[in-house]
Every structure is written in structure tokens, then in C-alpha cells.
């Protein structure tokens, strides 16, 4: 009966007992009710830790996408520093050109680091996805090709042009083989040597970028130091080119066997 309910409640308050709902301030009561509604609402179907895990699983794809953005910035910065951007390059001072070369190198390094962490995080978080598998090789190729084209824009260098052309030839060929194979249901898995190939390319291109932007970094122009670093950078680039061609031949043979 309503009267009994009111009597029992008042009696309880006289005896010193306080109902849990009455012990909370009004603001806390409203917060509890909001959380209760959220737990029952379709908008909040999972516990908070599940939503956090879902956001974490998106991190590898975010890193891969950021590599594409940084590769584009690096290429435009190198092109602008080399005078390839109409009107903008004409307004740049020598110090601004040096600054762009340094920023391009920093963007290249950060993008190269994400190439390791996105794959590692995807395996660690069990977040391997089809979208990530598509974006990752695209990001690698855009980063490598953009850096090589930017290097050639900075100035003529015969020791860079030939290996750069061979690397670009291999990348386009393997991409075409993958596309044709995918249309026929044939997959060309990435080999261990191909992963080392990417690492060698990034290290060699980074060394070539430092060499091409030697003055931008304020490095000492001593002939012995410059000459020694030149030998190291060119040797790394040619080694990366050799490994690149070997892996290209492996993909070619695997595609030929699968498609014939």
C-alpha cells in the first residue's frame, strides 16, 4: 500500500538508515542515470574497454595512411626546394630551401619508421586487415619512388639516376604482376628478402638525401668526409638496387609459374 511504503521509508530515515539513491547528490544521480541509459542504448553496445581495443586496432592503418601523407609532403618539399613548384619556388630564399630539404628528410625518416611499426602493431594487436594489406605496399612504393624522384630533382647525379631507374622499373613491374595475378585469384606473398629489400632501399635513400642536402644540414665540407660518405651512400644504393632486381626476378618467376 502507498501509505505503508511512505511509513516504512520515513521510519527507516528515523532509525538512521539512508536509502542508496538518497545518499547521492542530485548531480551524481543524474550521472548514474546517464551511464545506465548508455549501457542500454544501441549507441553504446560494448563496454568501454572493448571500444578502446577497437580504437587501438585502427592504429596500424592510421600509421600506414600517415606514411602516404608524409611521403607526399616530402616529395613536394624536395620539388619546391629544387625549384620545381611554379611561383612558390621563385619566392624561396636560400635558407628556406635548406629548411625544406631538412623537413623532407625528417618526414622521410618518420615515414620509414612507420613502415616497421604498422606491421608490428597489426600483428601484435591482431589487427591485420585487407585494407592495411593493400595500403602498406602502396605506401612503401610511394615513399621510395617519391624520394628517388625528389633526389633527381635536387640536381643531376649520374650515380643516382641509373639505380633509381632500375628500382622504379622493378616496382612498377611487380605491381603489374600483382594486379594481373589478383584478377586471376593468384597471390604473390611478400618474401623475407623483399622485406630486407625495403629496409635497404630506405637506408640507402636516406643516405643519399643527406648527401644531396649536405649544406642544408650544415655539415663540414671537408673533401675527405664528403668523399667517404659519398662512397658509402652510393654503395648502399647499388646494393639495394641489386637486391631489388633479385626479388623482382623471384616475383616474375612465381607469377609465370602460377599464370601458365
Image: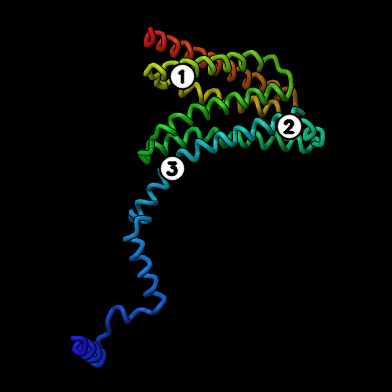
For marks 2 and 1 on the same chain, the one whose residue lies earlier in the sequence: 2
Q: Point out the tag, 1 or 3, that comes first from the N-terminus.
A: 3
Q: Position of residue 28 (x, y in %)?
A: 39, 74
Are circles 1 and 3 on residues that touch, CB within 8 Å?
no
The quarter of the rendered structure image containing the N terminus is bottom left
Which quarter of the figure has residue 237?
A: top right
Please state the horizontal and vertical placement of residue 163, each as a whole percent of the image. 61, 15
Classify mark 1: helix, strand or loop: helix
Are dots 2 and 3 in contact, CB under 8 Å? no
Q: Residue at x 25, y 91 (%)?
A: 10
Element type where label 3 sits in the image? loop
Q: In the image, what residue occupies the spot 33% across and 54% down?
A: 45
Q: Which is more foreground, mark 1 or mark 3?
A: 1
Figure check: 237 above or below 115: above
CA distance for labels 2 and 3: 33 Å
- Dot 2: what SS? helix
**Horizontal side, residue 245 vs residue 153: left or right:** left
Determine the residue positioned at 42% across, 76% down.
27
Q: Which mark is residue 58?
A: 3
The picture places residue 184, in percent across and down from the top left corner, at 39, 16
Q: Which mark is residue 179?
A: 1
Residue 34 as seen in the image, left or right of residue 218: left
Q: CA distance from mark 2 to mark 1?
A: 33 Å
Asked if the residue at tag 1 contacts the one at tag 2, i.e. Cβ–Cβ closer than 8 Å, the answer is: no
Q: Which residue sits furthest bottom?
A: 14
Mark identifier at residue 80 = 2
Estimate the x, y position of residue 67 in percent, counting from the top left: 55, 35
Which residue does the image show at 36% across and 65% down from the upper left?
A: 35
Residue 243 showing in the rendered view: no
Task: Please state, as top left, top right, bottom left or bottom right, where the C terminus lies in the image.
Answer: top left
Front in this rendered view, residue 184 or 120: 184
Amino acid at each position: 500500500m502507498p501509505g505503508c511504503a511512505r511509513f516504512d521509508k520515513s521510519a527507516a530515515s528515523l532509525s538512521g538508515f539512508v536509502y542508496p539513491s538518497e545518499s547521492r547528490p542530485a548531480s551524481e544521480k543524474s550521472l548514474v542515470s546517464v551511464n545506465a541509459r548508455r549501457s542500454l542504448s544501441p549507441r553504446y553496445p560494448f563496454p568501454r574497454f572493448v571500444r578502446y581495443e577497437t580504437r587501438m586496432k585502427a592504429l596500424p592503418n592510421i600509421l600506414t595512411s600517415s606514411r602516404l601523407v608524409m611521403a607526399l609532403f616530402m616529395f613536394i618539399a624536395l620539388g619546391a626546394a629544387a625549384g620545381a613548384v611554379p611561383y612558390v619556388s621563385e619566392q624561396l630564399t636560400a635558407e628556406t630551401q635548406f629548411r625544406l630539404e631538412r623537413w623532407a628528410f625528417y618526414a622521410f625518416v618518420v615515414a620509414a619508421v612507420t613502415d616497421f611499426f604498422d606491421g608490428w602493431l597489426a600483428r601484435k594487436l591482431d589487427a591485420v586487415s585487407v585494407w592495411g594489406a593493400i595500403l602498406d605496399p602502396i605506401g612503401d612504393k610511394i615513399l621510395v619512388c617519391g624520394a628517388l624522384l625528389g633526389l633527381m630533382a635536387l640536381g643531376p647525379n649520374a650515380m643516382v639516376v641509373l639505380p633509381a631507374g632500375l628500382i622504379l622499373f622493378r616496382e612498377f613491374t611487380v605491381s603489374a604482376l600483382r594486379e594481373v595475378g589478383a584478377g586471376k585469384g593468384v597471390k604473390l606473398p611478400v618474401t623475407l628478402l623483399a622485406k630486407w629489400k625495403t629496409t635497404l632501399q630506405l637506408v640507402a635513400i636516406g643516405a643519399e638525401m643527406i648527401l644531396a642536402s649536405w649544406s642544408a644540414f650544415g655539415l663540414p665540407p671537408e673533401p675527405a668526409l664528403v668523399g667517404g660518405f659519398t662512397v658509402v651512400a652510393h654503395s648502399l644504393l647499388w646494393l639495394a638496387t641489386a637486391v631489388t632486381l633479385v626479388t623482382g626476378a623471384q616475383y616474375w618467376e612465381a607469377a609465370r609459374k602460377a599464370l601458365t
